[in-house]
Image (cartoon, rainbow, N blue to C red):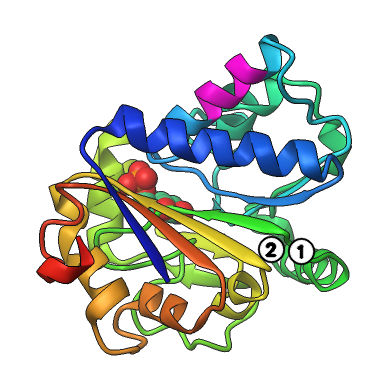
Amino acid sequence: MTIKVFKTKEELYSEVYEYYLKRLNKQPNITLGLATGSTPIPLYEKLINGYNEKKVSFKEVTTFNLDEYVGIDSGHEQSYIRFMKEKLFGHVDININNCFIPSGENEKLEESRIRYQELLNNHTIDLQLLGIGSNGHIGFNEPGTPFDSKVHIIELDEKTRIDNSRLFNSLDEVPTHAITMGIKDIMNAKEIIVIATGENKADAVFGMIEGPIDTDLPASILQKHPNVVIYLDEDAASKLSKERK
Ligand code: GLP
């Protein structure tokens, strides 16, 4: 694991952005693993600016998103498909037919799970972007999820629902389940970038980097991945031992 700690979020996101520019220009047909949540938004904004400034193109890029809520309409404000269109896909020259997100429609869940797994089995993610939940989840792989898990439906932790309720009108509106790439699918990516900012991520970040590798903290498995770079601000890094900072 490579750990990078930044004084400001601006410095952090600028460095991640520069790295994406380099990777996308080196490999225009790259397969990206994408994340939702608040964490990737500044990166997506920079990538949109980069596209507008003709520094990067997404024409040949394929993307796979980590997860989607179950039982949420694709037009719902908080659906991840809508999020991705609003925050990235709708603003760049990506071919939307090459952008994959599992469907969380109630009626077709099993079909959706099988289809997404087949797609992932047939593609290799070159560069996976991850945020981390305050309970250490990656994607929606909540504590207790086996490390060999593949695409599955999961019941969301109360903590996750409370964290994400800030984006809904009330806690009751937050879906109880999600469909997510499994931990094994995430670990299959050739390269992984994790971004975490803010004090409420500090415990999860400590567990991911210095804790035992344990399903209680799903992100701890990343210690075993051969190519992970973790970008932190000082608050998220605040619980790490001194030599890590
Ligand atoms: C979300 C997503 C994760 C994300 C995490 C943190 O619910 N399923 O992929 O990394 O929780 O979210 P945020 O970036 O908003 O803190």
Q: Is residue 15 above or below residue 33?
A: above
Q: Is residue 214 left or right of residue 108?
A: left
Residue at the image position 68 percent from the left and 68 percent from the top: 190
Q: Is residue 45 left or right of residue 101?
A: left
Percent coordinates x, y for residue 145 in the rendering: 44, 82
Query: Which secondary structure lies at badge 2?
Result: helix
Q: Considering the image in quadrants, where does the C terminus appear?
A: bottom left
Q: Evaluate whether residue 163 shows in this view.
A: yes
Q: Residues within 10 Å of mark 2 (few under 14, many from 20)?
A: some
Q: CA distance from mark 2 to mark 1?
A: 10 Å
Q: Is mark 1 within 8 Å of ligand 1?
A: no
Q: Nearer the viewer, residue 151 or 8?
A: 8
Q: Which residues are magenta?
A: 44-50
Percent coordinates x, y for residue 5 in the rendering: 27, 50
Residue at the image position 59 percent from the left and 15 percent from the top: 49
Name the kind of residue labelled 2 in the image: Leu
Residue at the image position 51 percent from the left and 22 percent from the top: 45
CB-based contact (under 8 Å), mark 2 and mark 1: no
The residue pinned by badge 2 equals 109
Percent coordinates x, y for residue 167 in the rendering: 33, 34
Percent coordinates x, y for residue 110 in the rendering: 72, 70
Q: Considering the image in quadrants, where does the N terminus appear?
A: bottom left
Q: Is residue 158 above or below residue 50?
A: below
The reply to whether the magenta stretch includes residue 198 is no
